[in-house]
Amino acid sequence: MNKDLADSTNTLHGARKTRANDEPVTPAVTVATSFFTHPDSIGFSASDLTDDSPFFYTRWGNPTIDLLERRLALLQKGEAAVAFASGMAAASALLFWKLKAGDHLILSNVCYAGVAELAHETLRKFGVEVTTVDASDPQNIARAITPKTQLVHLETPGNPILRLADISAIAEIAHKHGVEVSVDATIASPIGLKPLTLGADYEIHSLTKYVCGHGDALGGVVIGKKESIGAIRKDSLIHLGAALHPLAAWLILRGLETLSPRMLLHESNARRVAEFLEKHPRVDKVYWPGLPSHPQYELARRQMKNFSGLLAFTVKKDGESLARQLADRLKVISYAVSLGKTMSLLFRVPTEDILRTSFHMNDRDADAYRKWAGDGVFRLSVGLEDADDLIADLDQALK
Ligand SMILES: *Cc1c(COP(=O)(O)O)cnc(C)c1O
């Protein structure tokens, strides 16, 4: 398979071995095994692993996981990929491999709460210095770089308020100082964003979300240069041990087959719902990268190939009691915390809670967050249901 096939073709066929006549069309589930019999060909050290090593133990590699890794690398125009048991495992694998005591990490001040807490609490415990910045202005990154800075970690769109970061502008600034850039592109999905083509050094996805899509498996991936991915496989996958289960890899590969058409429908449904919410009298602001009213719409159009199905909105008053009302009254949409599933999910993220527990912002950045998010955002992961049914469900529940 060559690198120039379209995403929709690669999600179905990418990195497949040439198929023999009698081979099944789906990857075999029989490789849900923890080990393989190759008594003579491997050593005991992770350093013995080479490109030609046979599969012998699933924490090191497995045919089903290998197909998923190679397919995702191809799809995102990366040299190689390494999969993990969850998105958090992928993020921590990268951060623990890349950073050591005395190093400095610059982190987007709006990002997945688990990643923010991992940086502020766990990495700090190991002597890593962490600075959070509002990454919507690349100059904030430039100002935060010190001689000890090793990595800038971005999430775009950023959870939960869907603020964006300009990957090429930030990569240019960081690279001038010899600093690498990683991007968590989970919310955009691989169809919506190709961070490596914009200058990022590493790309992370929680495969649990859009890629799997069905909410029936956890997984994560880091994509990047072959040499770095090989080192992450050794230091973080083999030694830290958060290996993906081959059955989860199989479920994620099956989800990946329909990612491209699902994202088209997530996007067009999100547009319809966002336009409805923008006109609703109870709603204050709606944030979705595909709306011309998004403060960074021009950047979204330049950087994203699909605006995805996740939107956020604020209401004029009584957000907290409205959350309870929506949880009680919504019939099609579930009040639940995940995103990227086939079915629509809604959840409210109260501003003061997340500022206190996860984000560790300075006062000025916290004020900017409050200005964007009010006292809380409703995060709506628009699913694949009929858009009119979703709108009618929200309409009756918002009354
Ligand atoms: C869910 C999520 C993660 C964590 O992924 P898990 O698979 O739940 O561990 C990381 N980043 C983003 C943006 C996410 O949405």
Image (tube, rainbow, N blue to C red):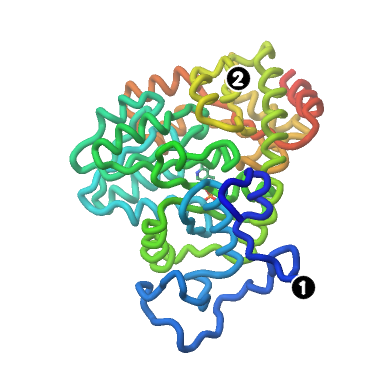
For the point 36% across and 64% down, the residue is: 235
For the point 30% across and 36% down, the residue is: 174
For the point 38% across and 73% down, the residue is: 46
Secondary structure of the residue carrying tag 1 is loop
Q: Report whether residue 318 is seen.
A: no
Q: Report whether residue 168 is seen.
A: yes
Q: Is residue 312 above or below residue 285?
A: below
Q: Position of residue 139 (x, y in %)?
A: 31, 24
- Give residue 22's mark: 1
Residue sitting nearer the eye, 4 or 394: 4
For the C terminus, the image quarter is: top right
Dot 1 alpha-carbon crowd within 10 angstroms: few under 14, some 14 to 19, many 20 or more: few
Q: Is residue 290 above or below residue 127?
A: above
Amino acid type of the residue tagged 2 in the rendering: Leu
- Give residue 291's mark: 2
Dot 2 alpha-carbon crowd within 10 angstroms: few under 14, some 14 to 19, many 20 or more: many
Q: Earlier in the sequence, mark 1 or mark 2?
A: 1
